[in-house]
Amino acid sequence: MSRRWLGVRPWIWLATLFVLLLFVQQSPLGQQIGPRANLFFAPLVSALQAPAIWWQDISQWFIGRDQLQSEVLDLRKRVQQQSFVEQERDALRAENMQLRSLLVLPELPDYIWHAAKVLGRSPDKMSQRLMLKAQTQIHADDAVASSEGLVGVVDSVSGHLAVVRTILDASLAVPATQPGSGLAVLVRGQGERLLVDFVPVEQAPPVGSVLMTSGSGGIFPPGIPVARIVSIRPVAGSVFAEVEAEPTAHWRRDAWLSIASQQHP
Amino acid sequence: MHSPLPLLLLALAITGLALSLASGGMLQPDWSLAILLGALLARRGTWPWVLPALLLHDLALYWTPWGVFPLACLLPILLQRMDAQLGPGLPQRMGMLLLVSMPMLFYGAGLMQWSLTLLLCIPVWHSLAYMYDRQIA
């Protein structure tokens, strides 16, 4: 690098570049550059994972007949049990509708759940961002959950590929509550932990209790576990306590996640 | 005569970036960062293709250009100044490698991942310096 580049000192070029980057990052377009860069790499990520998937597919061929038969019997049994559960669920749903109409409560929008494969994760310790691939159409702002709880929200979509911001991302706040209480709190990402805002000191739930999504705001379906409380510290002169929590979901080891798409009328 | 080395290194860096995204939960070095920093330290004249690649690296992995890229931009200028004042040497390059890779820790990489990246970068840097020397000779 010469002392001058195109007649201008290098530090002036650098300062101009940094100002330009700052300007671009603050713009709405700049906010989308990161997720778009991830989506750009999705086909290559998929290609790198292909050998492992082929190996898995080939090994499936060699699974013993007995094992498959026992799995089929087990699945049939589960389907039977599931049908009983579904019947009970339908009865409860009808009862719920009736009670809602009696209480004149607004009906919560329905969600369709579908499975999505985890294609990639950000390399930080907690995998704050994920890349998903689904067979069905995904939309931005769809909620993502695992069997253990809420994982995050779809940030951007390209076809059947999606980039997900997990609840540890500082830009995300999830309205939550504790079942059976009038608590209405916000769970915010803090990188490796969660912070729970607006917890009155007197109403603070005990350490170890689980907060669920409240459904306020309309993005997250209600009743999904979000966070387990880790510590509660009263703050001098404040009505609210400083509450730390950890996610109930452990998405770092999940190969499949579930996406909740809102059913639009 | 144009060398195919930059293209090969860029292809390796992009593959490394996809590998980091594909297996983000695993303990592994930051492959692309190690290759790109190795190339920049081996010859500071590689900055015209290394710096844009580092910007892409930061955008894909950290979703912001304020990761390794700003410090890497200073690297060619600082190297030139230090080489002129102190004479070309390893200590200042090692110091700069540590400095430039430091933002990794801020963006969630553990100490182990940082160490692995440095351990990969040093042999890459050594091999590339050797290859560039042979090209000149």
Image: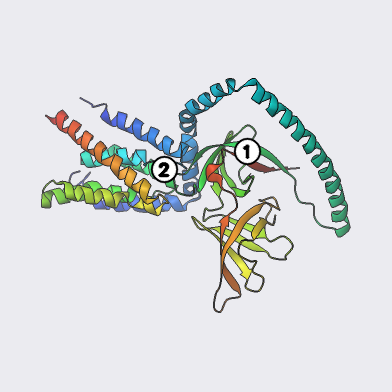
Mark 1 surroundings within 10 Å by alpha-carbon count, few (fewer than 14), some (14 through 19), many (20 or more): many
Q: Tell me the chain of label 1.
A: A
Q: Circle 1 sits on which residue? A: A138
Residue A214: x %, y % from top left: 69, 57
Q: How many marks?
A: 2
Taking the spot 77% from the left edge, 38% from the top edge, the residue there is A82
- Say which amino acid is labelled 2: Leu
Which of the two residues, A225 or A33, is positioned nearer the viewer here?
Answer: A225
Q: Circle 2 sits on which residue? A: B27
Which of the two residues, B134 or A22, is positioned nearer the viewer here?
Answer: B134
Taking the spot 45% from the left edge, 49% from the top edge, the residue there is A125
Taking the spot 57% from the left edge, 20% from the top edge, the residue there is A62
Residue B134 lies in quadrant: top left
Residue A41: x %, y % from top left: 46, 35
Q: Secondary structure at mark 1?
A: loop
Left or right of A55? Residue A214 is right
Viewer-nearest of labels 2 and 1?
2
Mark 2 surroundings within 10 Å by alpha-carbon count, few (fewer than 14), some (14 through 19), many (20 or more): some
Left or right of B129? Residue B108 is right
- The vertical placement of B57 against A183, above or below, is above
Residue A75 lies in quadrant: top right
Which disc is residue A80 wearing? none
